[in-house]
Image (tube, rainbow, N blue to C red):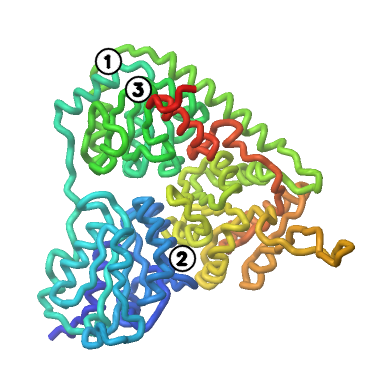
Amino acid sequence: MTEPVNGATLIARTLKARGVERVFALCGGHIMPIWMALDAEGIEIVDVRDERSAVYMAHASAAVGGGFGVALVTAGPGVTNAMTGIANAHVSRTPVLVLSGVPPRPQENRGALQDMSHTALLGSITRHARTVRHAHALPRELDAAIGAACGRGGEPGPAFLDFPVDLQREHIPDALTRVEQVAGRPRPRTRPLEEDLRAAARAIAKAGRVVVVSGRGANAAPEELARFLTAAGAGYLDTGETKGIIDDGHPAHIGAMRGQAMTQADLVVTVGRKLDFQLAYGSPAVFGDAKMLRISDKAEELFDNRLGEIALLGDLPETLGALADLLCAMKEDRDRSWLAKMREGHLERSEKLGQMLASAPSDAEGRMSPNRLLGELRKRIDPDAVVIADGGDFLSFARVALNPKTYLDPGPLGCIGLATPFALGAKKAAPDRQVVAVTGDGAFGFTAIELDTLVRHKVPVMIVVGNNRAWAIEVRDQMDSFGKVVGTRLQDADHAAMARAFGMDAVRIASEAELPGKLDEAFGVLKAGRPVLVDAVISGEAQSSDSKSGLAWVPDHQALDAWDKAERKWLGLDKS
């Protein structure tokens, strides 16, 4: 006779059957049965210091490793603490399953500890949010939540389930442990109609200045996308959602000519990408009379802001492969002179960027340029590394200077403060790859406590803090003739000392002269399999190169204002 299975065990076995190897969590009384069941089933529990970080880690794990990430948080403040991470995954369209608990059913609405409606709070920032109140419903509720997170019914994103504590302990019929919802089924694949594929291929062949812009969905089809770009003779612009999936050596790469490419294109092809603020909402004020071809596996990415002349809904590897085959079969000798000119400009600007990184001067006080720091990092980061960029000003430098194979940043929500938890989640998903997170000192402070988690779990990543001392101000001991304190100086925070307090290796770089040697020391620690923090004192006076060179994929505020003015003029609202 088999031992009875309770609800918590079925939850853990379902996750294991779906390939989940670890859960990021912070314990609490309302989730202890699930916690213990996960451990009993051999699923790793990465215990964190803040619930927001648990969701960030699950987010990065899914983004780097595929599948969906899982976070387990306790009731009440555990859920409310997690909401920022959930909102970030929601806007980034990243598959994350968040699990929690609630008081026992007999105590519901009687003033029990942490008795609140989590689903009412989370409905607007999740794809699915439900409280499971019946043990018999567990398999189908879990399947529905996992399917929603993975985009089975629409865009992927976070899904939320919570369970009364008594349901977690309740024995369930043995038959429910063997239903098909436990292991699940793959999402059905779809393909556009042949006539629509042929129409899209003809539109591409007819155009002379094709620009392809990739987004979330293209991450599932890097090889097919590369083949499609070659067959289409198209210029390619990546975005933060797909930075690095196409090697910069591919002749389609024209990212450094982004502004000109967007305004000169006669056909713009979006691949799994929304036309959001990063692409001027597809406005004719920027893209002119260019036609639009929208390709996605999600209908929501076909009809936002700008309707394409052609929209293809289908599995992206299948769709891009089919288009490449059709274009190759046409065997037309298309004029690629425009692409050659854009590529030449891209390479020229990229070369200038490399020279600028190597020669960026320190300021009058001897503090190194952020670009100088990033230029030296660029020399040492592995070609297949995972790089996380975080912060405000420092992120603006990093997203231009660094071009890794896999890149993560705060995304469209602009949710700074995720570098350290993202690095941990990414390393857990890709243990054989180098993981480096670069962050501004202000953003670093949001989740700096997770250095403790890195050390406890022995996760070998590098955290580089660009310390321009722009956050804390200390008053000087000076007074004017009226006794009023005058004069201030920026506080010299030592983040390396804080890291050492957690038992972590750390180096502090105070000048450009120290940079090469101390970076070599830090990368040596990383190679030895230990986490390391680099606290680099940088200048706060440098201007980010994205606004000067037009290399960035995210427009600055001046660019947004210019786009707004251009659109008003296009609409006839501004006659100037």
Q: Is residue 208 above or below residue 106?
A: above
Secondary structure under tag 3 reads loop
Quadrant for residue 184, please give it: bottom left
Q: Nearer the viewer, mark 1 or mark 3?
A: 3
Q: Are the two marked residues, 1 and 3, in contact with CB atoms closer than 8 angstroms?
A: no
The x, y position of residue 375, in whole percent, is 64, 41
Residue 433 can be seen in this image: yes
Residue under pointer 1? 331
Which is nearer the N-term, disc 2 or disc 1?
2
Q: Secondary structure at mark 2?
A: helix
Gap between marks 2 and 1 measured at Cα: 52 Å
CA gap, disc 1 to disc 3?
24 Å
Whole-number angstrom distance, CA of label 3 to CA of label 2 = 42 Å
Mark 1 nearby-residue class (10 Å; few <14, some 14–19, many ≥20) = few
Q: What amino acid is at disc 2?
A: Ser
Would you call the spot at circle 3 few (<14 residues within 10 Å), some (14-19), or many (20 or more)? many
* Relative to 18, residue 263 above or below: above
Label disc, if present, on residue 290 of the rendered structure? 3
Label 2: few (<14), some or many (≥20) within 10 Å?
many
Q: Nearer the viewer, mark 3 or mark 2?
A: 3
Residue that appears at 24% across and 26% down: 309
Residue 427 drawn at (x, y percent):
47, 58
Secondary structure beneath label 1: loop
Say what amino acid the circle numbered 3 marks.
Answer: Ala
Q: Which mark is residue 118?
A: none
Residue pointed to by mark 2: 53
Q: Earlier in the sequence, mark 3 or mark 2?
A: 2
Image point (24%, 83%), residue name: 108
